[in-house]
Image: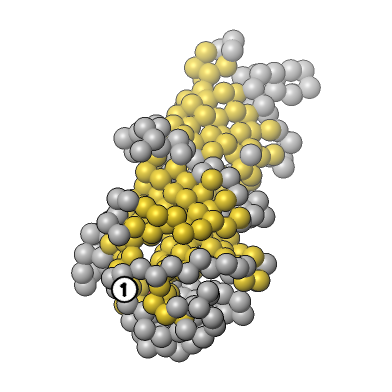
Amino acid sequence: MDPSAAEWEDDFESNRLRPEWLWINQDPSHWNVTDRPHLTITTQSGGVLLESNNAKNLLLRPVPKGDFTIQTLVHFNPVRNFHFAGLLIFQDLDNLLALGRAYCEIFNETLCIGNAIYFDHEEEGVWVKPNYTTPLSPQDIAHLRIQKRGDEYSGFFSNNGEDWIKIGTHKFDSSRAPIKVGLIADDGDTGAPEIDADFEYFLLRTTGESTLPIADIWAGIDNLDDSYQTIRFREVGGNRIMVDYYDDGASYCGVDENNNPIYPLRARGTATPIVEDIYTYEVHLSGSCPHKGPYLNTTVMYYYDPMEDTLTDQFKNFYKRK
């Protein structure tokens, strides 16, 4: 493993999911983490490929910019078209990648060979071949990995969770909108019998980047006075989040005869995620002015919208990721 890499993992051994997760089309009656030491998602009618945009219980989390690897182990024995359980790279319901154990037997031997590993790609609502069909025994378990390098996403499987075999690579344009990563279990909108997919863990590993959804540099224009502000969240280890703040429109450091700020304000501090809502951060900042020394000591709330990838503060200032 790269010593500079950062990892985020949910082992599903608690009776609740980690708060960084978010659901798309959640149906609480078809998932749980309490009946066994796994996350169980029960398939139901719905899918994500082609005309089917009605899959339920897509479990996702934001991912930082840059390269990354996601990984899971799923216990799943698909028996009918188009049972599917595995990893998901999700931009929206028409742009995604899905690597999983699935069942398919209606096309040809290249695309469908029954219970196997499939690596599906949809872009702008169009299914992109090939799907890298790969037989794998035993047929009720799968170690799965997707690795992103630039615009290439490679799918892997393993027989033991240690030695990984690449089955194929898709090119995927993730520049249109932020992507999210996570887990999926559905029946491809066929009405197949409901069966359980048991996920033992989910691992996200980034290449030297923070696993915080909010980590990066954000910039915004204050509509009241057109000042320019930036704020950066950095994960520095031990669950500590450091914050750097800059504002060229602050009056803390003095104003000229026209009431214009003389010096920009620079501040540093720490951020604490609110326990009930991982996307709300309480930020404590201490700042100084070139000619005054320490001057600012304040706490500000910041709110991150993972679906829109936007950031606002309690004063309604809007920030966009640089």
Relative to 320, say whether 250 is above or below. Answer: above
Residue 87 place in picture, x, y as percent: 43, 62
Q: Which residue is drawn at 61% across and 33% down?
A: 230
For badge 1, the amino acid type reads Gln
Residue 38 vs residue 113, the one in the foreground = 113
Residue 234 place in picture, x, y as percent: 46, 34
Q: How is the image coloured?
A: secondary structure
| Res. 281 visible in picture | no
In the picture of the structure, the residue carrying the numbered disc 1 is 139
Looking at the image, the residue that sits furthest to the right is 258
Quadrant showing the C terminus: top right
Residue 284 vs residue 130, the one in the foreground = 130
Residue 294 vs residue 309, the one in the foreground = 309
Residue 148 place in picture, x, y as percent: 51, 49
Residue count near mark 1 (Cα–Cα under 10 Å), binned few <14, some 14–19, many ≥20: some
Residue 81 place in picture, x, y as percent: 45, 84
Q: Which residue is drawn at 51% across and 58% down?
A: 168
In the figure, is residue 155 to the left or right of 223? left
Residue 209 vs residue 280, the one in the foreground = 209
**Secondary-structure class at tag 1:** loop
In the figure, is residue 76 to the left or right of 222? left
| Res. 207 visible in picture | yes
Labels in figure, total: 1
Relative to 78, say whether 226 is above or below. Answer: above
Looking at the image, the residue that sits furthest to the left is 36
Quadrant in the picture for residue 182: bottom left
Looking at the image, the residue that sits furthest to the top is 291
Relative to 3, say whether 159 is above or below. Answer: below
Quadrant showing the N terminus: top left
Q: Residue at x 36, y 79 (%)?
A: 78
Q: Residue at x 21, y 69 (%)?
A: 36
